[in-house]
Amino acid sequence: MRKIINLNENWLFTKDTTDITLRQGVQINLPHTWNAEDGFDGGNDYFRGSCQYFKALKKADLPQADLYYLEFRGANSSADVFVNGKKLAHHDGGYSTWRVNVTKELKDENDIVVIVDNSPNETVYPQMADFTFYGGLYRGVNIICVSDAHFDLDYYGAPGIKITPTVNGKDAKIEVEAFVTNLKEGQKLVYTIYDKEENELQKIETTELKVNFEIANVHLWNGRKDPYLYCCEVEIKENGEVVDNVCNRFGCRSFVIDPDRGFILNGEEYPLRGVSRHQDRWGVGNALLPEHHEEDMDLICEVGATTIRLAHYQHDQYFYDLCDERGLVIWAEIPYISKHMPGGRENTISQMKELVSQNYNHPSIVVWGLSNEISIGGSDEDLLENHRILNDLVHEMDSTRLTTIAAVSMCKMDDPYLLIPDVVSYNHYFGWYGGDTTMNGPWFDKFHETHPNIPIGCSEYGCEALDWHTSDPKQGDYTEEYQAYYHEELIKQLFTRKYMWATHVWNMFDFGADARAEGGENGQNHKGLVTMDRKYKKDSFYAYKAWLVSPEVDPFVHVCSKRYVDRVEDVTKVTVYSNLEEVELFVNGESIGKKKADDHFFYFDVKNEGETTIVAKAGDLTDESHIRKVDEMNMDYVLVEKGAVLNWFDIDAPEGRFSLNDKISDIMESTLGKLWFMGVGLAIKKKMDANKKDKAEGKKSGGFDVDLKADGGLMQMMGGFTVLRLTGMMGMMNISFTKEELLKMNKKLNRIRKPAKKNK
């Protein structure tokens, strides 16, 4: 009978080597990444290369078996496996399970060497993306010991059985297909269905590899309301003895994605409102333990999400299991992202085969993601063909689910790329990366009008927030207050549009992006509703909780801006979130009134005098904060960029004249402003050309290699940036401006008068 032995303990790790004979290094246990410290400290200089993992293995420590397979749950991003000096396997793709038959090479004493490599290349995805590609054996390693007759271990890391439930009224048909190697005469397959309490419901003994069960009055898997799971076990038996066995849980549910009604689960409208998740966290990178996954799931459930987009790669099987158990509806995808590589087609195919094969039995998954923002540089025929191949492959492997893509804002509504998948979502950041918050809802209305038969969703939206604060939040200030305002506006726009099949906040958690130099803390993307260490829930977390969590389930009241104590204004705005219908605010013990708010966002004006204690009361619940009157702004609340040559408060901005603090869209309303902007465009182009030259000569340039095209979509996005913010963000593309260059720009802008405002 199958035995699975965990091999996570006692490995020897050697950094920056491909020499499989080395036996010096650091003793470690798995999971492990070599980027647990440098992967999110900024500078885009985290180590990317080859490292060795060595383990001594005695065959006597293993159970007796006919065959032995090493199983790797995740090795990023390519790996070679050697047993006793002989190379047995190579694998490309850092996020899936894969196995190696090591039977013939095992001796009494064995040297297991794995060379893992996360170096840049042109064939293995991902290579360009806004997150860190942590290297290492960052998930567990097992050895699977089986008999000669066993459930298939060689096909794309799949579990060996494929379970396809079909709901028909109150009943369900369950098709179970077994994939068996070397089934011998006299051996039988025993298929058994169990309910959630592990009671045996039905059993079939046969030599057939495919059987069907009927479950009358089936208990449906019904999302977060009732995520009921059955279990199917299949055994190979000979003379009453179990030779091998596999067991997988499954759920019975039906779903439809309708272009007008959104997501429909088991015949009822079930709005998919949720978050995206990156797997990494502070201090451990991507080398997560079960308790890390559990904490993430608890937080996602607390915020009230009904769906998770598991971005931008295959996640740990343990987390998919949690999604099944907790009833989250899942978008699962491969890391075909940002940059289409003509040499990477085979890798997209193999990663998709692994994703679908390994995760087919999870009822939580409803869509397979083909790609993310892959058309950022435009859609050529090779890219389109790659998508058609993937789309057809998925439909061939899985006829029960749909395909989707996450398109970037600049992707035009008539792009043929949008017609390939079954459903479409867009990544929009109007109100953060250019534009303004009011543009989001109308954009989706326009798409819905243009493509009435294509279900449309929002796969990413969000803005960054750190521990910066203000009473006058503005786009690009990285304050917790602007993030809260942004999400208030987006919630009202997106959640009230019934036709949107799914919305996913970017992101549930801050995550490592070592190339980033934004917000005053380099190396992270800070769009999370929760910090990277999972210790602080930002105010926007509670905005979603107010909308998505029923007060019967988890009533709450939350006063925003608790970290913003020192305030200069005489009257300050206090925002309260609650899922209860009425909030009363007390200032130093005295009530200043009660308010009701259909949108769950309650606003109060509070006199700011001396030391003030603020208490919000909703039902029997209270929450408290404190403010203090000060004469001058506390500069600890104001972002001063690390390494920045200028900040907004250092810039000369004469009344009635433009400056670097003005939005590009406003500057472009002036003829002289347009001419000025053209000059800046030429300066940027020169810097980009210099970068390309450096790259051609083999010099490290880092950052994102993005082609800035002045099409309508990009200009619409850029228009909402101030000039200072735009030049600062250019650092992500390795384009920097000196203080002298910026001051020279500002001096020219100061000469241009702002157009007189037209009376409405």
Image (spheres, helix red, strand yellow):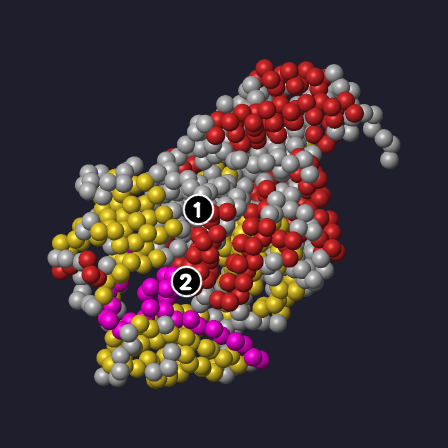
- At x 56%, y 79%, the residue is 168
Residue 80, position as x, y percentages in the image: 30, 49
Residue 341, position as x, y percentages in the image: 50, 45
- At x 48%, y 30%, the residue is 696
- At x 35%, y 84%, the residue is 206
Magenta run includes residue 155: yes
For label 1, count other residues whose C-alpha is less than 10 Å away and answer few (under 14), some (14-19) or many (20+): some
**Residue 745: which quarter of the image?**
top right
User: Which disc is residue 123 wearing?
Assistant: 1
User: Separation of disc 2 and disc 1 at Cα?
Assistant: 22 Å
Please give the residue where the numbered disc 2 appears in the rendered image: 358
Please indicate whether residue 442 sits to the left or right of residue 133 in the image.
right
Residue 546, position as x, y percentages in the image: 60, 52
Residue 358 seen in the current view: yes
Residue 199 seen in the current view: no
The foreground one among 759 and 429 is 429
The residue type indicated by label 2 comes to Gln
Numbered range of the magenta stretch: 140-169
- At x 37%, y 61%, the residue is 157
